[in-house]
Image (tube, helix red, strand yellow):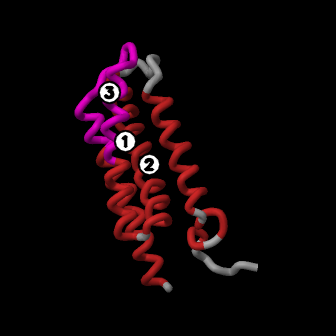
Amino acid sequence: MNTDKRPMQNGLLAAPWAAWVMLALWSAGIWFVNTRSRVFSIGQAATDYVLYQAGHFFGHVVLGLLAMRASTLTWGWRKGAWVALAGALAHAVLDELAQLFVPSRHANLEDIVYNMAGVLVGSVALLVMRQRGRTRS
């Protein structure tokens, strides 16, 4: 029986291919949602604005976490962290630019900022979790 309390170090979550599959699925989900011409609306401008920006931010927090995990498992922490950050930030920008080609959608610099902020928070969160794991070991 495995008594290790660090699940990300063992089993399926430690397999680079599984991390890349999770990243690809999450990325596809973001693209699917952001390339729909119909967007959910509550009907109140302020509430819709908060929900949209929270969606941009938190969706990309997860993207940053998954990108950092997949890249660092593949290339190690130094190279992997840079690859993850560059790839996730490029995704954040391209995701918004793709909306230029979707009827009733538009690219917005503010959304790009929320996307990029989410990527940075997610990436840093994984680095902090890694550091905390080191100090507890």
Residue 93 in the image: state x and y as whole percent: 30, 38
Instruction: Check the picture and name the quadrant holding the N terminus.
Output: bottom right
Q: Is residue 56 left or right of residue 18?
A: left
Q: CA distance from mark 2 to mark 1?
A: 9 Å
Residue 104 in the image: state x and y as whole percent: 37, 14
Name above or below for residue 89 compared with residue 18: above
Residue 48 in the image: state x and y as whole percent: 38, 27
Of residue 131 and residue 67, the one placed in the foreground of this image is 67
Of residue 48 and residue 17, the one placed in the foreground of this image is 17
Q: Residue placed at 43% from the left, 29% from the top?
A: 34
Q: Is residue 101 magenta?
A: yes
Of circles 1 and 3, the one toward us is: 1
Q: Earlier in the sequence, mark 3 or mark 2?
A: 3
Q: CA distance from mark 3 to mark 2?
A: 26 Å
Q: Which residue is mark 2?
A: 63
Q: Earlier in the sequence, mark 2 or mark 1?
A: 2
Q: Which residue is mark 3?
A: 46
- CB of mark 2 within 8 Å of CB of mark 1? yes
Q: Which residues are magenta?
A: 89-115
Q: Is residue 6 magenta?
A: no
Q: Which residue type does callout 3 highlight?
A: Ala
Name above or below for residue 130 compared with residue 56: below
Of circles 3 and 2, the one toward us is: 2
Q: Which residue is mark 1?
A: 91
